[in-house]
Image (cartoon, grey):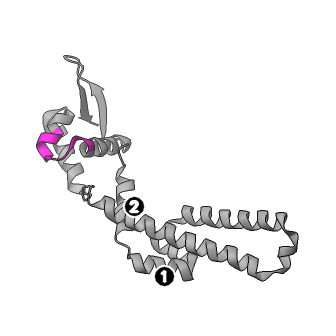
Amino acid sequence: MIASTQDLERTQKLAQKGLWTTGLLTFFFPLLGYMYTGRYKALLKGFGICLGALFVFFLINPSAADDEDSANGIFFLYLVGATIDNTRAVRKAKNSVGTQPVLNPDLNVKLLKLAKAKGEISLADCVIETSLPPEKIQGVLNDLQRQDLIRVANRSSDGAVVYRIV
């Protein structure tokens, strides 16, 4: 699966976060930890799981509702799980940033100028021009197409996939 420019930007932003800062914030203040990393969906999922576990626990054992230690234990498990989840996400982002190109807005302009100069460009033309791997170029071309800056078509002479500027 080719990541979109938005996914790459999100990953690069997450990779800039500190592991210790993420871990400490998430453990002591889960809301702040997830706000720091911008992972709001993960916060809601984890909190929902914690509430669900509390509900099931108290449904199975109604007498535990009077025992604060039970609820505190489940909340502690949530804190540990949330801390591990958030720090793993930062670690994964840091590891994957090394395999992704640094986003370069000039690359979009370079490809658009190439398409304008040639009339139509193929993936091979873009790879030769930029010296980047085809997978990365394909992702950029897909983003340009989603933004209605280029159109994809087939060349009538040989059926090759080409991109034309709008």
Q: Quadrant of residue 70?
A: bottom right
- Amino acid type, mark 2: Arg
Residue at 28 percent of width and 41 percent of height: 138
Q: CA distance from mark 2 to mark 1?
A: 22 Å
Task: Check disc 2 and report the residue beneath it.
Answer: 10
Instruction: Find out whether residue 19 is within the magenta segment.
Output: no
Q: Quadrant of residue 102?
A: bottom left
Say what secondary structure mark 2 lies in.
helix
Near mark 2 (Cα within 10 A), the count class, few <14, some 14-19 or many ≥20, is: some
> Along the line of sight, which residue is nearer the eye, 55 or 31?
55
Task: Check disc 1 and report the residue beneath it.
Answer: 24
- Amino acid type, mark 1: Leu
Where is residue 32 drawn, in percent x and y? Answer: 53, 78
Residue at 35 percent of width and 60 percent of height: 9
Where is residue 42 drawn, in percent x and y? Answer: 55, 63
Q: Quadrant of residue 55?
A: bottom right
Say what secondary structure mark 1 lies in.
helix
Q: Nearer the viewer, mark 2 or mark 1?
A: 1
Q: Would you place residue 127 above or below residue 28 in this image?
A: above
> Along the line of sight, which residue is nearer the eye, 95 or 17?
95
Q: How many marks?
A: 2
Which portion, as a residue range, is magenta? 126-135
Where is residue 141 drawn, in percent x and y? Answer: 28, 42
Q: Quadrant of the N terminus?
A: top left
Instruction: Find out whether residue 127 is within the magenta segment.
Output: yes
Q: Quadrant of the C terminus?
A: top left
| Left or right: 131, with 72 as reference point | left
Residue at 56 percent of width and 81 percent of height: 29
Where is residue 111 drawn, in percent x and y? Answer: 20, 44
Farthest residue, direction top: 157
